[in-house]
């Protein structure tokens, strides 16, 4: 009886590891796509530049006041087909529009809080769904991996 229970538990664990998914698949790897029903909208890929601020503050600047990737959804869902990007290292941050550009400030005393995102592996090990766990206010946002200046930007309107 114990062996049968252990076998059933192991089978359930393997089945839960990856969910079946039959929807649209991103055409390009390493680019998060906003999921709008059966449509996929690519996020805007940009590089943030570092600017030294007061004291030990570092401001990351992204050119342009607003992203071209837009969603009306307050809790967006992304699909990501990975090749080089590690999905588990992506963090979501709110960006502040200032002087025709988007900014985020990191300081030793006050780091911006990452917005919680739930990561789910789909089908095979390379397709992921990222779901924002809280409602986002209208504004500019960016997904970025720690240690990388590449930012995947989008706007909630």
Image: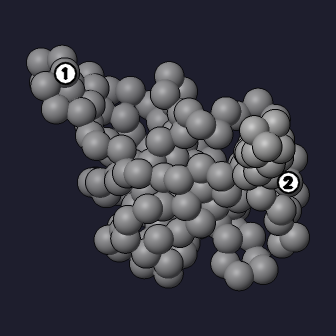
Q: Which label was assigned to residue 60?
A: none
Q: What is the quadrant of the N terminus in the image?
A: top right
Q: Position of residue 146 (x, y in %)?
A: 49, 28
* Residue sitting at x 48%, y 52%: 117
Q: Which label was assigned to residue 123?
A: 2
Determine the CA span between mark 2 and mark 1.
40 Å
Q: Position of residue 6 (x, y in %)?
A: 76, 39
Task: Examine the rendered structure and indicate whether residue 31 appears above or below residue 33.
Answer: above
Q: Secondary structure at mark 1?
A: loop
Neighbour tally class for label 2: few under 14, some 14-19, many 20 plus, Cα within 10 Å: some
Q: Which label was assigned to residue 108?
A: 1
Looking at the image, which residue sits at the far top?
A: 56
Of 15 and 3, nearer the camera is 3
Does the rendering let one see residue 101?
no
* Residue sitting at x 60%, y 55%: 130
Q: Secondary structure at mark 2?
A: loop
Neighbour tally class for label 1: few under 14, some 14-19, many 20 plus, Cα within 10 Å: few
* Residue sitting at x 53%, y 53%: 118
Looking at the image, which residue sits at the far front?
A: 1
Q: Position of residue 22 (x, y in %)?
A: 87, 70
Q: Position of residue 100 (x, y in %)?
A: 35, 56
């Amino acid at each position: 009886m114990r062996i049968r229970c252990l076998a059933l538990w192991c089978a359930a664990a393997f089945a839960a590891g990856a969910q079946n998914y039959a929807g649209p698949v991103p055409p390009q790897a390493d680019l998060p796509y906003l999921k709008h029903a059966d449509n996929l909208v690519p996020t805007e890929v940009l590089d943030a530049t570092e600017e030294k601020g007061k004291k030990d503050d570092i401001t990351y600047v992204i050119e342009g006041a607003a992203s071209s990737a837009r969603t009306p959804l307050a809790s967006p869902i992304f699909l990501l087909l990975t090749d080089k990007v590690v999905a588990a290292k992506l963090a979501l941050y709110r960006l502040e529009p200032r002087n025709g550009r988007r900014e985020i400030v990191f300081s030793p005393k006050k780091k911006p809080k990452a917005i919680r995102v739930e990561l789910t592996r789909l089908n095979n090990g390379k397709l992921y769904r990222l779901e924002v766990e809280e409602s986002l206010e209208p504004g500019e946002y960016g997904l970025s991996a720690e240690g990388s200046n590449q930012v995947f930007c989008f706007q909630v309107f």
